[in-house]
Amino acid sequence: MGNNRIKRWTALLLAAVMFIALPAPASLAASADEAKTALQRTFTYYKIQQDGVLSGGFEVLAAAFLTGENLTDYVLPTTSQSALSSSLLIALMKGDTAGAAALAEELAGNLNKQDYITTDAMELIAIEAYNRSALASLGAYSPVVYAQSAAVSRLLDAEEVGGGFGFGSGDPDTTGMVLAALALFNTDAYPAVQAAVSRALDYLRGAQQENGGFSAWGENNANSAAAVIWGLCALKQDMNAWSKNGKTPVDALLSFQTEQGGFGYANALENDLVFATPQAALALALVTSGRTFFTDLTAGADLYKGLSVGVADRSGAYHERSVTVKRGERLSTALARALRTSNAVNASDYYCRATGALLSSEDLSGLADGAEILAIHKSFENAAYFLTGTDDGFGVNTAEIPFGASQNLTLRIASAGAVSAAVPLAGVGVDGDGDGFWDAKTDAAGRVTLSFIAAGTHSVRALPAGVPGGTALLPARITV
C-alpha cells in the first residue's frame, strides 16, 4: 500500500512537471510573430499599392514611428488634419516642435468642447503627449496649461451602465479609445480612474466574442478589435490573458487582413483605408513594439517635412511625386526620390524653384512642410506652361471643374533659369486626353478651351510643333 502511495505521488509530480513544461498554446505564442509579419505586409501594401502615402490620419505614421520604419520611404500625413489632436500627434512624430506648440495652444483653448467622447479622449492623449515632450526638451519649449481635471472628469462622466463607454450601454470601439486616454491617469493618485478602468475591462471581457474579437452594430470587425487593443496596450495588459477559446484580440484582428496587406472592416476581401487598415496598423505596432504610444509618445528627434516635387528631366519627361526629407538632407536627395532612382542626382544640373523663387543652394531648411519644388533640367533654356486661372504663376498649374464644364487655359513661355516676363504661345496644339494628338490649338493670345468627357484628373500638354526648341513642356492638371 505504501508503494502504491509513492507511485501515485510520483505520477502526480511528473504530471505537474509536464504541465509546467508544456509550451503556451500555439495560437497565443504565435500572435506576436504573426502580428509582426502582418504589419510588414501592411507597410508593403502602403509602399507598393499606395505609393508610400500614409493616409487615414495619424495611425499608420504612428505604426511606422513605433517600429523604426524609415520614414523617408513614405509620404507622411500633413498637420492640416480635420482633428486637432491628429494634427498635433503628427507634428510631434515629424519632430515639428514649433508647429506642435502652436497646435497645442489651440487645442488647449478648445478642449472639452466636442460632441463625442472619443474626440475628447484623443485630445487628452495629444495634449499630454505634447506636455510630456516639452518636459523632456528641458526647457527648449514649454508645456501648455489646460483644464486637466475637467478633461479627466469629462471622460469619467461618460461611463455607461455596465462600465462601458459609447452608445447605449457602451461599445468596444469607444471603450478601447477611452481606456487609452484613462491609462494616462491610472495610478493611485486617481482612484476614480482606477475604478472606472476596472469596470471598463470587466465590460470588455463580457463583450468579447468567441473568436477573441469584438463586435459593433452586430458585426464582428477589425475596427473594434483594433480599438480594444489600443486600450489594452495603453494599460499594459497581457494580451495572452485576453484569450477566449484560444484566440486573442490580435488573432481576431489578423483574420481581417486582406491578401494585399490592408484590412477589411468585417471581412478580409476589401481594403478599408479610412478606418480599418490605419487602426489595425497601429494596433499591430503596439503589440510588436511593446510601446504604449498613448502614454509614452514624445517628439521625434528628427525633423521631417513633406515636399511636392516636379522634375522635367533631360529627356523632357515630367515626373511628379510627393517625397519626405529629414533634417540635413539636401535638394539632390529630394530630386532623386521624385525621380524614383537610386542613382546620384545633382541638383546643380537643374533650374530649381520653390514657391516661384529660384533656389540658390541645396539647403532645404528654409522650406516649409508641404512646399512645392519645380526642377527643370538645364538642357532646356525655356519652359512652356499653362495658366488655369488668374492667380497662376510659372509652373504646373491645376484646376477643378464640374462634369460637363469646359476649362480655359493660356499657354505661355518663359526662361527656365531666370524670373522673367512670359509671352503667349500661339498656334500650338494642345492634347487634353493623352492620346498624343491635339484637341485644340491656342489662339493669338495663347488661349485654348478644352472639354472633357471623362471624370478624373487629366494631364494637359502642349505638343512640340510650334514651340521653340530647347523648351521644356510642363503639363497642367485638370480634375473633372
Image (tube, rainbow, N blue to C red):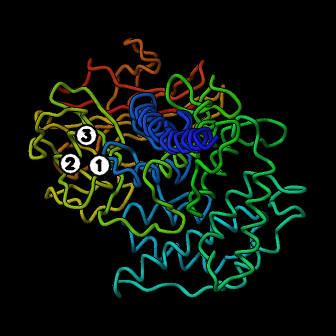
Quadrant location of the N terminus in the rendered image: top right
Say whether residue 10 is visible: yes
> Which one is earlier in the sequence, the residue at label 1 or at label 3?
3
* Residue 452 position (above or below residue 93): above
Q: How far apart are marks 1 and 3 (CA)?
A: 13 Å
Q: How far apart are marks 2 and 3 (CA)?
A: 15 Å
- Please state which amino acid type lies under the numbered disc 2: Cys
Location of residue 82 in the rendering, given as x and y in whole percent from the top left corner: 61, 58
Residue at image coords 68%, 27%: 267
* Residue 289 position (above or below residue 480): below
* Residue 113 position (above or below residue 281): below
Q: How far apart are marks 1 and 2 (CA)?
A: 7 Å
Q: Is mark 1 on a helix, strand or loop?
A: strand
Q: Is mark 2 on a helix, strand or loop?
A: strand
Q: Report the mark closest to the observer, 2 or 3.
A: 3
Residue hosting label 2: 352
